[in-house]
Image (spheres, rainbow, N blue to C red):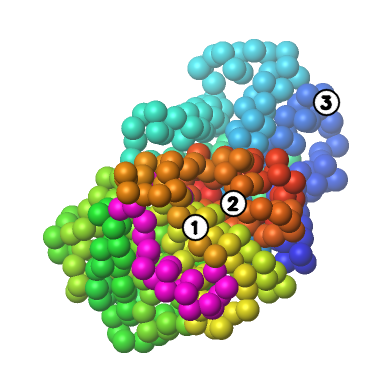
Amino acid sequence: MWAVISRVVIYVLIVVAPVVMSAFLKPTDLDPFPVELATRLALLGFSILAMQFVISARIKWVERPFGLDQIFRFHKAMAVVAASVLLLHPVLLAAGHGNLDLITSILQPAPIIVGKLALLSLFVLAIVSIYRKTLNMEYEKWLVLHNAVALVVLVLVGIHAFILGADVELPATHYVMAAVLLFGVIAYIKHTLYDPLTSKKNAYQVVSVKRETHDVCTLELAPADGGSIPEYLPGQFGFLTLHRKCSKEVEEHPFTISSSPTENAYFTTTIKSSGNFTSTIVVTKPGDTAELQGPFGRFSYVLHPDEHDLVFISGGIGITPLMSMLRHMRDTNADINVRMLCFNRTEDDIAFRDELAEIESGGVPKLNLTHLLSTPSSTWQRGHEYANREMIEKLLGDDIESKVYYVCGPPAMMRIVFDALLDLGVPESRIRYESFSL
């Protein structure tokens, strides 16, 4: 808890520092209230915008108490806040000065035009980000555009503020804003230049490629120099970049580490063919190289050592972090009860079926496993079964509220399960999940 509080306090102090400095050390010639408010909002928006680069730079000290999925959601929320306060800035200035030309006229001094360009760029960035999927823009292309335009917006806002901001002329405010800007620039350089160079130095080699199902493959990777892999928790993920002889596709994507941390000579990641990039996983061959940035995430039972009565609910390829946890429980002789519900479409879609059966029969952990299919074959005895409130209540029986739930699967399935558990009286604090929307 202290780790969470300390990060939040530091973030708030950095974001409000220019505003506080400006408020206490403002010039003697006071402006009308709308102008004063416009100035404060501009300073706040600038700080939030600069810190966007810090909170999205995958800095482990920042990410560790929250999980990267929570950090990304916060990043999106603060982007809306920054855009809102920066858009209010010229409106309040025009109202305070009684001059709408500040908004409507393009015949303005260069620093004001720079500010307008910053707002226009910010608006375009927001629209493209919100409607990326509607525009059929690939994630990798959007990410390059997002990072480039965001940096341009930060620079333009900085130029506008340092030239026109009367409050910025105050030495203390000037230095604080310069420091905040520096934080953002350093984080950007770290994320876009330093991290990729570091990852290339710590390269991995594909040792084997195993078919789990008709559209799921497991890649086994080991350090190219023969060393040990970084420590990670069962259920964590990393950003993997593959370099393959048979494909020109070189993209970075987040994939769960499906192996157990007890194996320190290699790690595995299990990937389903479901998109432009993942559909090319089948051409990956032993000897291909890869880079991994991570691990990240807090979706792991080992972070809650006092909990021994767990329910795992997976949908499709969402089984991978749960498989990592089960393997770790088995390898460490963990005394834990696990009730597991695996939802899939057909029998052919069940990944790790044999290994799951072996873990269940082995008794460590105490696993009670049920496979459920939405489109079963005529020989499947259980029939059609879907993830919904009635099915979950029927399968879990009594004492639902006291258990701890780990849920991973497609977003629609996770929403159904989450709502069903809440409806059945499970406290939100006892439902663990990790969800990305990239």
In x, y percent, where is residue 127? 47, 29
- Judge left or right: residue 279 versus residue 15: left
Residue at image location 54% in from the left, 60% down from the top? 340
Residue at image location 82% in from the left, 42% down from the top? 23
- Which mark is first along the chain, 3 or 1? 3
Q: Indicate whether 70 appears above or below 256.
A: above
According to the image, label 1 marks what residue? 370
- Which mark is first along the chain, 3 or 2? 3
Q: What is the CA distance from the residue labelled 1 to the residue labelled 3?
A: 64 Å
Q: Indicate whether 167 appears above or below 134.
A: below
> As rendered, which of 211 and 37 lies closer to the eye?
211
Q: From the viewer's perspective, is the residue at label 2 or at label 3 nearer?
A: 2
Span of residues in magenta: 343-367
Query: Circle 2 — which element?
Result: helix
Is the C-beta separation of discs 1 and 2 under 8 Å? yes
Give neighbour class at mark 1: few <14, some 14-19, many 20+ (Cα, 10 Å): few
The disc at residue 395 is 2
